[in-house]
């Protein structure tokens, strides 16, 4: 007998076995017990979450003899007996001509749909209800959708439709509004890992906890994907499936190798980073796979740190951001390996220290007095041969005046450094203008407004600054004009 894949052997036989979708199984159990079933269901969710399996269970339950007897007797039902899987109707369900299944991805034309639904108006041959299960219904053509719309709008007696889709937005509203919508959630990793461990036990195989968690994480909420990964590892293993077996079988990089790369980056050791990434490439993995594995590992580390007393996520966030950017650059590039290597090397570079100039807070009420001293000094210097100083002063903004200290601001650090040599001469000229000693201090701020604005009286100066902010302008003369 041919080997049967785990994802087919693991299909639920009753609503109680529907893993991770308790909100749906509970609602359907109540509806079946009360005999309040709809003529059309739209099952929505990502791949491998149980849409088609649920449609089959519900279709089988609608024709189950035991359930029909319980409904006539008014007896409430349990999820474990929906369906019973023992009566003649349940036993013959898969071969029944009254149960029609087709894939809309390969039968999407209007002729295909009309042919498959040609028996909808005929009475069921053996079952109580004739069921049509249409998978990937969003793939139907516009004409094919219209051909089933009339059937769903005014269904023949004893006919039920189950429409499954992974893309609800592509299903016309005319169909959606006539169906009961069942939304299937992504199955939590913990739920998948526990189910895999139980299934492995029934297969007489020990699935280690960390291996189960790794498979569950790779499945990304899809039970079918998880069962396929487990089946692959089961075929390659003996009596035990370890994390190392999962990594080798599925072609993954080990957490130890990932941790070596992360530790080397944290230690700012480029040589260690080079050795670790070389080991990773020696496994034959693509650069984007290694980068995505690093991002996932960093995410896991951050989640493990949530309960730690000392939380410092900045370094890990920086690594994740850099790797995300590198992953985007790799696609379509001919040198993805080099992009990843250089990204990791930059992350391991020694941290540079940048000196951010302190923002100086100056009382605004002395600003006019400071500007008067500045421009009077400017007029005094202009009568002498001070061309070099005058060119620097034209790029200066008066920031304030406190006591005997005049604060001047520059947008450019280079201009500020040149002006430092001229400060003594400026202070002597300012002292003569103010008739007292004046001390000059300077700050550098690249966000300063143009110094020409200082010569414009209020409120025109404020209005002009606001206009420059609105138009995101750097040349005030254009805004002024």
Image: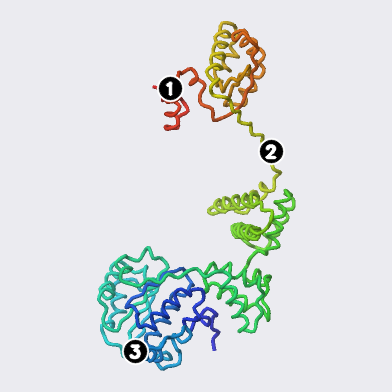
Crowding at dot 1, Cα within 10 Å, few <14 / some 14-19 / many 20+, comes out as: few
> Dot 2 lies on which element?
loop
Q: Give the alpha-carbon distance from disc 3 to disc 2, as whole Å.
A: 78 Å
- Residue at 28 percent across and 68 percent down: it is 143
Crowding at dot 3, Cα within 10 Å, few <14 / some 14-19 / many 20+, comes out as: many
Q: Which residue is mark 2?
A: 353
Residues marked 3 and 1 touching at CB (< 8 Å): no
Work out whether residue 151 or residue 74 is closer to the camera in this orientation and state it: 74
- Residue at 41 percent across and 65 percent down: it is 167
> Dot 1 lies on which element?
loop
Asked whether, in this view, residue 271 is left or right of residue 5, the answer is right
Q: Which residue is mark 1?
A: 459
Q: Give the alpha-carbon distance from disc 2 to disc 1, as whole Å.
A: 41 Å
Name the spot of residue 276 as percent of width and height, x first. 71, 57
- The mark that comes first in sequence, 3 or 2, is 3
Q: How is the image coloured?
A: rainbow
Q: Give the alpha-carbon distance from disc 3 to disc 1, as whole Å.
A: 87 Å
Question: Based on the displayed image, in which of its 4 quarters is residue 439 positioned?
Answer: top right
The answer to whether 426 is drawn above or below residue 236 in the figure is above
Work out whether residue 436 or residue 109 is closer to the camera in this orientation and state it: 436
- The mark that comes first in sequence, 3 or 1, is 3
Q: Which residue is mark 3?
A: 127
């Amino acid at each position: 007998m041919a080997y049967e894949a785990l994802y087919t052997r693991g299909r639920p036989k009753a609503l109680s076995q529907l893993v991770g979708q308790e909100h749906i199984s509970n609602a359907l159990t109540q509806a079946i017990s009360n005999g309040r079933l709809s003529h059309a269901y739209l099952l929505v969710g990502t791949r491998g979450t149980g849409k088609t399996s649920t449609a089959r269970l519900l279709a089988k339950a609608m024709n189950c003899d035991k359930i029909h007897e319980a409904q006539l007797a008014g007896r409430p039902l349990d999820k474990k007996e929906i369906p019973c899987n023992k009566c003649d109707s349940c036993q013959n369900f898969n071969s029944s001509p009254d149960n029609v299944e087709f894939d809309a991805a390969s039968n999407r034309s209007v002729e295909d749909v009309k042919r498959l639904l040609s028996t909808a108006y005929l009475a069921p041959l053996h079952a109580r209800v004739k069921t049509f299960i249409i998978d990937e219904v969003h793939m139907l053509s516009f004409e094919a959708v219209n051909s089933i719309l009339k059937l769903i709008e005014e269904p023949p007696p004893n006919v039920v439709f189950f429409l499954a889709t992974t893309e609800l937005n592509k299903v016309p509203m005319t169909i959606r509004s006539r169906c009961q919508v069942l939304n299937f959630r992504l199955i939590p990793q913990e739920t998948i890992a526990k189910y895999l461990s139980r299934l492995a036990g029934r297969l007489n195989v020990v699935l280690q906890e960390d291996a189960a968690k790794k498979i569950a994480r790779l499945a990304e909420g899809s039970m079918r994907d998880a069962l396929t990964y487990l089946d692959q590892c089961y075929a390659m293993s003996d009596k035990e499936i370890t994390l190392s077996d999962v990594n080798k079988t599925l072609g993954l990089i080990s957490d130890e190798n990932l941790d070596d790369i992360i530790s080397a980056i944290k230690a700012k050791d480029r040589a260690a980073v080079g050795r670790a990434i070389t080991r990773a490439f020696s496994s034959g993995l693509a650069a984007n796979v290694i980068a995505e594995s690093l991002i996932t590992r960093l995410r896991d580390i951050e989640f493990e740190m949530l309960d730690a007393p000392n939380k410092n996520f900045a370094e890990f966030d920086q690594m994740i951001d850099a790797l995300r950017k590198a992953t985007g650059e790799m696609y379509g590039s001919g040198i993805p390996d080099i992009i990843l290597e250089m990204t990791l090397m930059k992350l391991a570079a020694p941290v540079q220290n940048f000196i951010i100039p302190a923002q100086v807070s100056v009382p605004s009420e002395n600003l006019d007095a400071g500007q008067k001293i500045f421009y009077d000094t400017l007029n005094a210097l202009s009568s002498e041969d001070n061309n070099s100083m005058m060119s620097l002063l034209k790029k200066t903004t008066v920031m304030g005046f406190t006591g005997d200290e005049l604060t001047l601001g520059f947008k450019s650090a280079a201009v500020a450094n040149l002006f430092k040599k001229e400060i003594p001469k400026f202070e002597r000229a300012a002292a003569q203008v103010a008739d007292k000693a004046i001390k000059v201090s300077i700050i550098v701020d690249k966000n300063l407004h143009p110094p020409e604005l200082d010569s414009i009286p209020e409120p025109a100066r404020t209005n002009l600054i606001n206009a420059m902010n609105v138009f995101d302008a750097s040349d005030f003369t254009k805004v002024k004009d």
